[in-house]
Amino acid sequence: MKILILGTSGQVGTELMRAAWPPGTELVGLARPEVDMARPETVAAAVAEHAPALVVNATAYTAVDKAEGDREAAFAVNRDGPARLAAACAARGAALIHISTDYVFDGTKPAPYTEDDPVAPLGAYGASKEAGEAAVRAALPRHVILRTSWVYAAHGANFVKTMLRFGREREEMRVVADQHGAPTAASDIAAAIVTIAGRISAGNDVPWGTYHFTGTGETTWHGFAERVFQRLEAATGRRPRLLAIATADYPTPARRPANSRLDCTRIRTAFGIAAPLWEDSLERVLDELLSSPAS
Ligand SMILES: NC(=O)c1ccc[n+]([C@@H]2O[C@H](COP(=O)([O-])OP(=O)(O)OC[C@H]3O[C@@H](n4cnc5c(N)ncnc54)[C@H](OP(=O)(O)O)[C@@H]3O)[C@@H](O)[C@H]2O)c1
């Protein structure tokens, strides 16, 4: 099967390019110079040129706070790009796996969100991603939308790398302890996508639709940082004091959901996919990060 991956410079895109695809998979990876999601003509041209059976969209405008003052750009990349991509896929008979986010929810539900819960994004980023989901659903029945949360990898900009850097430089860290969710390794998302692609390739009875996929278990940003600092201390003997603060003590331009927990039952039932415990995936990524002198 020929698969077109968009967004190969990002966390998930990078892991998709190095994932364990089955023999016979023809992978074409494109980054922004070739396909700019804010320039829809480049999107349609790439699908026409490569004629893939499946496209995986790992691009997004992911700067959550910046999006508040840059709404148009966020919507161009997160809504208009995917809309054009889904239309191009429909025209060419390709399927689409599109990645979305926990930020489509407002976080007021006192339990993990299921795929059927109503969306109510709190900020411009969440709203633009929600609009992208809707555009994909409207244009292309053969889609899988994967909503995930708190993504990190050994490369790219993410919470784990920020904590490691600050942990080495600072005596004290204040981290929010009242937002609940599940960290998700980009490599686990890539592995889930390989499984879904295998099902699409087999061709029969693909359960198209929207799915939640995150690391198994749950924590807070504070609990996530605690785990990173435990490993930092074991590796370097250094560890900052970690203080738990409330979201209200750390104002940001964009509001974030207090509850980002996503119920991942549906993807397990439909595709047999379950992520590792978030702590186990974090260990693996920290092994990679702490063994590299550059990190
Ligand atoms: N990061 C998270 O915590 C998180 C949480 C929930 C869901 N998600 C979702 O997961 C998916 C992957 O996120 P990620 O963490 O891998 O993001 P990332 O590391 O920020 O990568 C984003 C990718 O999108 C590309 N991109 C941005 N604007 C573009 C444009 N106009 N045209 C083409 N490419 C463009 C970037 O290319 P450049 O390198 O050229 O900028 C980069 O390759 C996204 O759908 C995101 O919304 C992420």
Image (cartoon, rainbow, N blue to C red):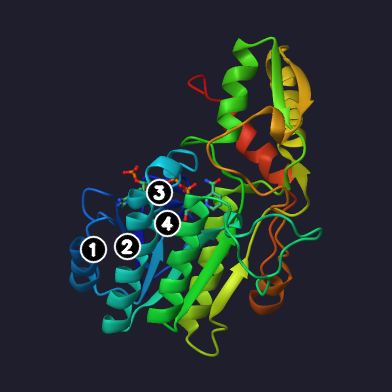
Kindly state the secondary structure of the residue where label 4 is placed.
loop
| Residue 83, disc | none
Left or right: 49 in relation to 149: left
- For this rendering, which residue is in front, 161 or 28? 161
Check disc 3 and report the residue beneath it.
61
Give yes or no for contact between labels 2 and 1 (Cβ–Cβ under 8 Å). yes
Up the image or down, 65 lies above or below 187; here it is above
In this view, the mark in front (4 or 2): 2
In this view, the mark in front (3 or 4): 3
**Res. 50 visible in picture:** yes
Q: Quadrant of residue 251?
A: top right
Identify the mark nearer the N-term, 1 or 3: 1
**Alpha carbon of mark 3 to alpha carbon of mark 4: how far?**
10 Å
**Alpha carbon of mark 2 to alpha carbon of mark 1: how far?**
6 Å
Identify the mark nearer the N-term, 2 or 1: 1
Check disc 4 and report the residue beneath it.
58
Left or right: 258 in relation to 40: right
- For this rendering, which residue is in front, 211 or 21? 211
Which residue occupies the extreme bottom position in the image? 204
What residue is shown at x 69% (from left), y 74% (from top)? Answer: 266
Amino acid type assigned to the residue bearing label 4 in the image: Ala
Graded by Cα atoms within 10 Å as few (under 14), some (14 to 19) or many (20 or more), the crowding at tag 1 reads some
Check disc 1 and report the residue beneath it.
40
Amino acid type assigned to the residue bearing label 3 in the image: Tyr
